[in-house]
Amino acid sequence: MNDLDGKYKILIADDDPTSLAILAAMLEKAGYDILIAVDGGQAF
């Protein structure tokens, strides 16, 4: 955990908006910072 606020950042890449929203909500609730990509190109 080298981030200044002490949180881990997680990149989620998924082309299904429902799966993306559910996973992002779960991880945010667990205290993670979330970065979202809707496809592999955006994730890269």
Image (cartoon, rainbow, N blue to C red):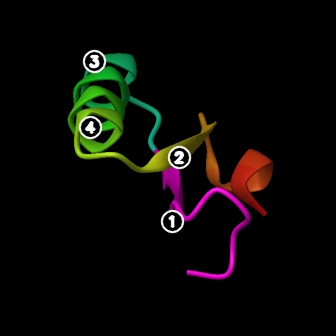
Sequence-wise first label, 2 or 3 = 3
Name the dominant secondary structure of the magenta segment.
loop
| Residue under the image location 27 percent in, 18 percent down | 18
Residue 2 among magenta residues: yes
What's the CA distance linking mark 4 and mark 2? 12 Å
Mark 4 or mark 1, whichever is nearer to me: 1
Please name the amino acid that badge 2 sits on: Asp
Q: Which mark is residue 33?
A: 2
Which x, y percent locates residue 34?
Answer: 53, 43
Which x, y percent locates residue 17?
Answer: 39, 19
Please name the amino acid that badge 3 sits on: Thr
Sequence-wise first label, 3 or 1 = 1
Please name the amino acid that badge 4 sits on: Leu
Q: Residues within 10 Å of mark 2 (few under 14, many from 20)?
A: some
Query: Toward which corner of the image does residue 43 lie, by quadrant?
Result: bottom right
| Residue under the image location 26 percent in, 37 percent down | 23
The residue range painted magenta reads 1-13
What's the CA distance linking mark 2 and mark 3? 19 Å
Residue at which label 4 appears? 23
